[in-house]
Image: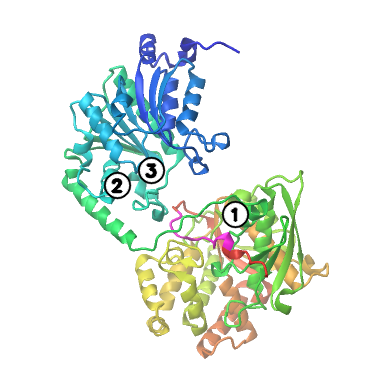
Amino acid sequence: MRAFSYDAAFDRNIGWLTEWEQQALRGKRVALAGMGGVGGVHMLTLARFGVGAFHISDFDRFDIANFNRQIGANMATLDRPKAEVLNEMALAINPELEIRRFDNGIDDSNIDAFLDGVDVFVDGFDFFVLGIRRKVFDRCSELGIPALCAAPIGMGVGFLAFLPGRMSFEEYFRLSGRPETEQYLRFLVGLVPRALHRAYLVDPTRLDLAAKRGPSTGASCQLCSGVAAVAAVKLMLRRGGVLPAPYHHHYDPYVGRLAVSKLRWGNDGPLQRLKLALGARQIAKLAQRPARAVKANAARTPLEEILNVARWAPSGDNVQPWRFELLGDESVRVHLPAPARDNVYEYRAGEPTLLAGGALLESLAAAASGWGRRMEWRYEDNQDAGGAGHSMLVDFIQDPRVIRDRLFGQMMLRSVDRRRYRMRPLDAREKAALEQAAGAELVVEWHESLGRRWDLARLNARATDIRLRLPEAYPVHREMLDFGRRHSPEGIPAGAIGLDRAMIAIMRWGMQRWSRLRMLNRLGGTWSVAAELDIAPGIASAAFFTMRLAPQATMDGSTRAEAILRAGRGIQRFWLEATQLGLAMQPTLATLVFAEYGAMGTGFTADGSASRRAGKLATAFRAALGTGPEAYVFMGRIGEGRARLPLFRSIRRELAELILSPTP
């Protein structure tokens, strides 16, 4: 084993540091409170700078929930004391280190011992630990010790330096005498006066000050360590140039900005007081919501892991029709319900549900590959409820030859994008990849010219006009549209349907009662909605596509149900490939539904005017495509999506809700 050499270990620092400065760091001592998200990486970064001594404190142990951000957290350190693990990691970098541990944390009895002889204090306390944090910062001010706070904010870092003789921690944050929740708010607003992170906070419900929970990332912890370590080194080497509070720095690489603010009066300034008032109102609003359930995140079996990923398969209106009957550790029976008689979208004896079932089968196959298994399935010929529904027996067979499907990572990113796309045409490579993904049993037809996009966009607008005028569709839409949540586990968030805020507000009002919606329809509301939902996005696409079954799809003696299940697999594969290529997609199956009703002259509604409109849609469909809707199984639009935050999307029910309870 090679002997350790301080000079050799830190030689690559020389150039940015002089040789004598490096040796000076060898004699410096840093106090670090907390060995978790930022504290642990602070210690290792400073150890690699060659700092020679540390006082560290932490009474907690590593848990799986720490893995996303804490540098000492891994399977080998589960349940071990954090301070002990970081002590070992730092000594593995520099065996000469002098480390004094405070394994029971910091309290009134040991603050002075913790700060004894240190050159700099670096804050690594958890965000919600304010009482002892305030005392440590106050004592640093009294002892003339520089105290640094680098806070992980979103994917960036907020940095404050409290230096001897300058504004203190209390003078900046103004926490004294405030209720606990207000102290958290003041601490947060003081850490991020410019709030750069708000631009990409996609799920605000994860920030819960009352429950002392909030999101964090490993990247931000790494940034914090770099910022704090450089400032600490500058201070210990007396290089100057560290702007003290009331200056605040917030660097966020996600938005690509550095904001430097000077809060002359800290949180007592007029603008900060306004932010605090707005923040208090937001907290009060959140407090009125039901308490958010915190998932246990228990370990799952491989079968449960496969089902948990596959449940993200698409289904019409996000109804998630499948239910899982567990048949041991390697098999599951998938149940699909019979078509609901009152659901006008379940045409052709429930083929949309079968397409969704096929998409689930493809998702199960791709998910199984992630756990070294291949998927085999067999249709059980409508054995559900005496032939009323459908069921498939699915086996997962361990196979060392199986490698993870290259589209595995797209299954939860794939979603419906109803907004406008870029109008760049698809190139030959993209179309070939999509056609190959769809498989030999589906024929993909492209409709790319401006004229063709206009024709199909008008067909979709006609279908929307029917949907909004149809009394039978009203309860489906009312149940499906979710006006209260950004992420809907059982429907479609209103913000994801493609309407602007004003139109969503009108739609929300109208959806409360059929009489209101009918009044809006009479005022021409259907065509206003159709123009925004169908015409503009339809033109702003690369292409529309239609899919039909290839002649060989049923030549092997398969039933129509089996052929549609396989078509669903091909559609899902097509969609996953589109996601892999960076393309967005929106199915337009309702156009097929109503066009076919119209073509057959089916009296699918008591509203005669809706039936007449469906007949006109069928005529327009045949004129646009040269054949009737009965020839197709799927259609939609596709194009290069515009990069946007996923603020609104349909998510999925929890796996436990989809697993059937065993029969007693």
Circle 3 sits on which residue? 255
Q: In the picture shown, does residue 196 fall above or below 479?
A: above
Within the magenta stretch, is there residue 636? Answer: no
Amino acid type at image mark 3? Val
Residue 179: mark: none
Q: In the picture shown, does residue 149 fall above or below 287?
A: above
Residue 184: mark: 2
Circle 2 or circle 1, nearest the eye: 2
Q: How is the image coloured?
A: rainbow
Q: In the picture shown, does residue 466 fall above or below 643?
A: below
Residue located 47% across and 82% down the image: 469
Where residue 338 sits in the image (x, y, percent)?
Answer: 66, 77
Image quadrant assignment for residue 518: bottom left
Q: In this rendered view, identify the residue nearer to me: 95 or 554.
A: 95
Query: Which residue appears farthest toward the right when viewing the image?
Result: 556
Point out the stretch of residues depicted in magenta: 646-656
Residue located 36% across and 63% down the image: 289
153 left or right, relative to 273: right
Indicate the quadrant containing the N terminus: top left, top right, bottom left or bottom right. Answer: top right
